[in-house]
Amino acid sequence: MVGDPNAKMVVRLYEDPRCPVVADFESSGAKAIRTHTIQRQTRTEYVFASFKDDRLGGDGSQRAVNALRAALDAQKFTEYHAVLMADQEEAEASDGYTTQRLLSLADEVPGLRSEAFDTAVSTMKYSDFVTASLTAYRQTGEDPIGPGTPSVAINTTMLTGELYDDLFDEEVLTGVLTAVERAPEALRNRRV
């Protein structure tokens, strides 16, 4: 969870670090969510999947989720997440999120590298978190393998159909978030 824990609006993001569609989302509509989070209008909860590891081989998604959890401890989650998403294209096909690559990418975030962070990344310290996050992902929605990534829920309402397409347009998604902020029932009644 990032942002103001007391924010009335909650955005839950479902992402696999190796998913190229997630990288597209992070470079477009996700900017609206980050702005609302920074402005303390929402809190953002991440549920990470690692199904790309099963489909493409390797353990890069699991290693990236573990490293993101370590970055959260260092209070550098948002910055490190942005770096991983910017580097994601190589990671998807080649399982590029190796321990060494994750540590190298951490160099791009001032103040992130430390003995604690490096050890957590190297030893998969948060493997229990990785497993719990994947389990939570798989338990979301009706599909037993999970909702797909990226998926976004605002105040427990999953964005589907036309609203899903809005995820990739920063301006439109800003409008959706603003409408929900003004009238939390807006999504349930589809009056966005």
Image (cartoon, helix red, strand yellow):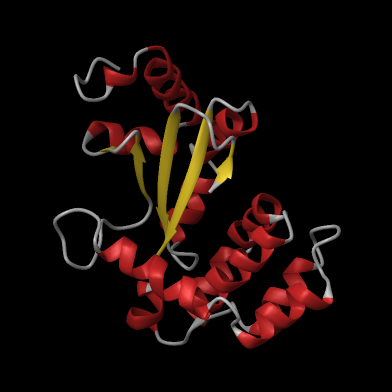
**Quarter the C terminus occupies:** top left
Please report the residue visible at 38 percent of the width from the left and 74 percent of the height from the top. Answer: 52
In the image, what residue occupies the spot 56% across and 28% down?
36
The answer to whether residue 151 is above or below residue 94 is above
* In the image: residue 65, left or right of residue 75: left
Furthest-top residue in this view? 182
Q: Quadrant of residue 103?
A: bottom right
Q: Above or below — where is 175 with respect to 55?
A: above
- Picture quadrant where residue 147 is located: bottom left
Residue 184 shown left or right of residue 24 in the figure: left
The image shows residue 66 at horizontal and vertical percentages of 57, 73
- The image shows residue 187 at horizontal and vertical percentages of 26, 24
- Whether residue 81 sits left or right of residue 153 in the image: it is right
Q: Residue 177 falls in which quadrant of the image?
A: top left
Name the residue at the left extreme: 142
Q: How many numbered marks appear?
A: 0
109, 41: nearer the viewer: 41
Residue in the image at 66% along x and 55% along y: 77
The image shows residue 99 at horizontal and vertical percentages of 66, 83
Residue 42: x, y in percent?
51, 31
Residue extending furthest front? 6
Q: Is residue 141 above or below residue 34?
A: below
Residue name at image x 47 percent, y 53 percent: 46
